Amino acid sequence: MFTSNYGRFLNSELKYSPKYLGDIIFPNDYVKKVVTAYASGEVTRPLILCGRNGTGKSLLARLIPQAIEQMDRVVVTYIKSYALNSDNEVDRLLTKNKQFDLLFTTNGQRYNYYIVEEMNALIKGRNAFRVALDRFQGTDLTIITTNEVARIDKGIRSRCEILEVPACKPEVFFTHAKRIMAKEGANIDDDALLEALEATYEQTPDNRSYYQLLDRLFRECYLRQQETKEIIMM
């Protein structure tokens, strides 16, 4: 029986995406090791999370500060990379009130957090950005996400820990996928589910595609159930 609140439709990424770092399905041991080191709060070197779309880079960037502070609501400054279009703009976004920040942190947090999203090209304010990364390491934790790490200024790259975040392999994502379908009341054969995950990975290797696959499988199961009910009622 289907118990989903979404009826015949399911947005599994929204409903089942990890809410805490401990819920993350890491693609490999190295990614887990580096992320765990940052989550301890002992590592403050700026971090670049790179990889193709849909592999969980933005999710990790959001959950790392939460894990460090050990609370759900953390004050984080999100910056679009296109806003860093001059040294003056970088100074305005990253270095304002720094005399205060060197003595205190926002909301009494361990660090001030900056997440720069989608830095996929050379930014015009790179000189000031380099200075900010050097000057405020240990006070700030800056996390950058990118699909094109080679296009980031090499001076910025040299100051950062660069971590590639690949998609989970089908066999890694399988347990999570099986749990989602079971919770939604969709009965799918294990072999068929793994085969579908493998086909999805071969075509589009990213975690978001897995979630979209589960949504399609759920709808197919729902429609089959409805057809069976109609036959029984005839």
Image (cartoon, rainbow, N blue to C red):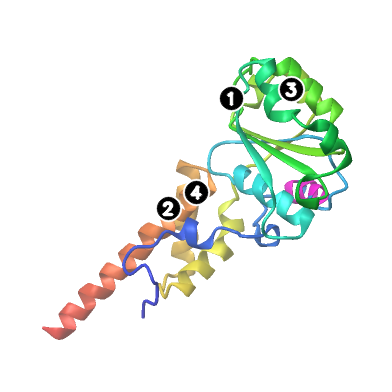
Q: Looking at the image, is 179 positioned above or below residue 27?
A: below
* Neighbours of disc 2 within 10 Å: few (<14), some (14-19), many (20+): some
Mark number, residue 83: 1
Label pair 2/4, CB-CB below 8 angstroms: yes
Tell whether 106 sits left or right of 166.
Answer: right
**Amino acid beneath label 2:** Gln
**Quadrant location of the N terminus?**
bottom left
Discs 1, 3 touching: Cβ within 8 Å: no
Q: Is residue 3 left or right of residue 63?
A: left
Give how far apart the Cα atoms at labels 2 and 4 are. Answer: 6 Å
User: Farthest residue toward the bottom?
Assistant: 233
Q: Nearer the viewer, mark 2 or mark 1?
A: 1
How far separated are the C-alphas under marks 4 and 3?
A: 31 Å
Residue that mark 4 sits on:
208
Near-viewer residue (136 or 117): 136
Q: CA distance from mark 2 to mark 1?
A: 32 Å
Taking the spot 86% from the left edge, 27% from the top edge, the residue there is 135
Name which residue lies at 69% across and 52% down.
Answer: 74
Question: In which quarter of the view is residue 136 placed?
Answer: top right
Residue lying at the far left of the rendered structure: 234
Circle nearer the viewer, 3 or 2: 3
- Element type at mark 3: helix
Q: Which residue is mark 2?
A: 212
Q: From mark 1 to mark 3, how far is it between C-alphas?
A: 12 Å
Under circle 1, the secondary element is helix
Given contact means CB atoms under 8 Å apart, are the residues at marks 1 and 4 in contact? Answer: no
Task: Identify which amino acid the numbered label 3 is placed on.
Answer: Phe
First to last magenta residue range: 31-38
Q: Read off the residue under disc 3.
A: 129
